Amino acid sequence: MLEITVKGRGGQGAKTFIEILARAANYEGKFFLAYPEFGPERSGTPINAYFKMDSVRIRDREPIKSPDIIAVLDSSIPKYDKEIKKKGKVIINSEFDKKYHFIDATTAAKKFGSRPNMAILGALIRLTGIIKRESAERAIKETFIGDVEEANLNCFREGFSKVK
Amino acid sequence: MRKALNGAEAATEALRQIDPEVFSAYPITPVTGIAEGLADLASEGRTTGELLPVESEHSALSVCIGASACGARTATATSSQGLLYMFELLGIASGLRLPILMFIGNRAISAPINIHCDHSDSMAAKDSGWLQVYCETAQEVYDLSFIALKLAESASLPIMLCQDGFITTHTLEPVKIIDDAEIKKFIGFHKPKDTLLNTKKPKTMGHFSMPDSYFEFKEAQEKAMSHSIKEYSRIIKKYSRISGEKYPPIARYKTSRADFIMVSMSSVSGIAKDTVDELRKKGIKVGFLKIRLFRPFPYKAVCEALKNAKGIAVLDRTLSFGSMPPLYSEIKNCFMGNIQPYVFGLGGRDITKEQIHEVFKKLSKKDYEEGTRYIK
């Protein structure tokens, strides 16, 4: 089973991130569970969202303790070193980093009128290949309409092409 | 077709296909998604039923009762405080024998305020005369919606279809959707025997009933409730022909020849089964029993599943203050020996000394029977 934890702050789109992954995984006939960790639900407070994927039906609805991939939407979120599995991948929202994969998702979001989640999602798809790019883009198109769809697709593609 | 849906969306999808003539609800976390989803569908012209937003849960269920009494297929959704606010109407819906479909996102009761899952809300309503079914996954929510509707209509009793708040209502998972035409054929039309609007056969509903008749109403209700176990089995058999899924009243997971069996309900079943697999790999003979149909409680099947276990653990997601938790109590009920349940005095019916003599006489003759006896 593949496990992803998305770390962000309320409003940055951690929940939407896993919803798009879920729809994309569904197109590919995979089994998955996608759920956010609901707390006080305030804008700006730290939030985790979880995504699990497998070739068989998943029964375990526990929070993910040790993910294969961590996607960090906000550079101010601390403490993810101890969680990540050995050989796991961490993707962070940053202009530069020596240790982790990074993409300046905040700038990308501002450039296209989107949110940081889209650029990080693009980066994740590029780096891990867990689902096809086409499936992710189709899920984005299914989730949004009009200008927002366009902005999010562009931001996703920016993350896909510019991740380091 | 397979869709990525959470439990609330699975309920909405089922409601789209059922297309009840009247849906009335007041939004409450964690089932707001159901009413919202239906409102979206209605605005897109994808449903034909009346969608009635009201000012409270009390009114929502009142609307359903009125509409159902007039013969309409009706549904609602609520949770926690919302269900408690409906409480006054619960007995009216079941007493009038109205097959209302109610979705519940199980949530803790205030105070202190909490929006997350436990079963205190629907368990508080377990004796209100409503059928109750508990779902583990969004897939179950979807499939059991149709089964619940048919069960309610065949038994002329309202039904609560429960799923765990957030854990199920807000988790996206793959849900296999059945064709609209197949569902339409399965659910058919709702043709109640008696309705308020049938001028050719005028009826009074919810009239005054004195001690000379009230007991018989309640006995008939209980009869309908206990008979619905058979109906449930018939309906799931029919449903499995279109879905391939089987939804027995209890789901046994590696319980045959298990030394130790855990019993529980709803979403915890997933990790319970995973744990059973882990222990079985180590050679420890354990099993898990999931209770799906809680009202009526399938005593015979549960007893059969548990009778050879060396030890049984029952996991309840609610307290019964000052008593034992509800699921535990039901499991204990499966293993009663020389103790006979009687019900007496409903609606002011007198009980006589002669009848009490009779109770003792039967005890001394070891005259027990399965199920409840009535002293009328």
Image (cartoon, helix red, strand yellow):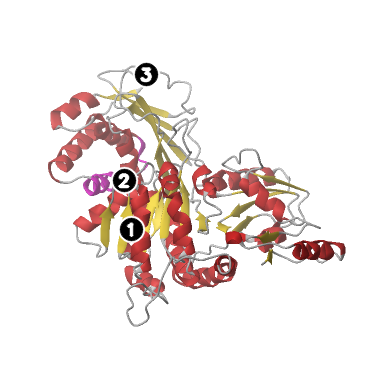
Task: Name the one closer to the observer, B361 or B80.
Answer: B361
Which chain hosts label 3? A
Kindly identify the amino acid type of the residue bearing the numbered disc 3.
Lys
Above/below status of B168 relative to A87: below
Mark 1 vs mark 2: in front:
1
Residue reaching furthest to the bottom: B200
Count residues near mark 1 (Cα–Cα under 10 Å), then give few for <14, some for 14-19, many for 20+.
many
Which residue range is magenta in the image? A128-143
> How many numbered dots are placed on residues in this image?
3
**Badges 3 and 1: C-beta atoms under 8 Å apart?**
no
Q: Within the magenta stretch, is there residue A92? A: no
Say which residue label 3 marks.
Answer: A99
Say which residue label 2 marks.
Answer: A132
- Which dot marks residue B63? 1
Count residues near mark 3 (Cα–Cα under 10 Å), then give few for <14, some for 14-19, many for 20+.
few
Q: Within the magenta stretch, is there residue A139? A: yes
Count residues near mark 2 (Cα–Cα under 10 Å), then give few for <14, some for 14-19, many for 20+.
some
Which quarter of the figure has residue A40?
A: top left
Residue B37 at what x, y percent from top left? 29, 51
| Secondary element at image label 3 | loop
Residue at screen point 48% across, 21% down: A82
Kindly identify the amino acid type of the residue bearing the numbered disc 1.
Val
| Secondary element at image label 1 | helix
| Secondary element at image label 2 | loop
Spatial separation of the CA atoms under disc 3 and disc 2: 26 Å
Residue at screen point 50% across, 53% down: B135
Residue at screen point 38% across, 74% down: B188
Is residue A35 shown left or right of residue B355? left
Which chain hosts label 2? A
Residue B69 at what x, y percent from top left? 37, 67
Spatial separation of the CA atoms under disc 3 and disc 1: 61 Å
Residue B345 at what x, y percent from top left? 64, 60
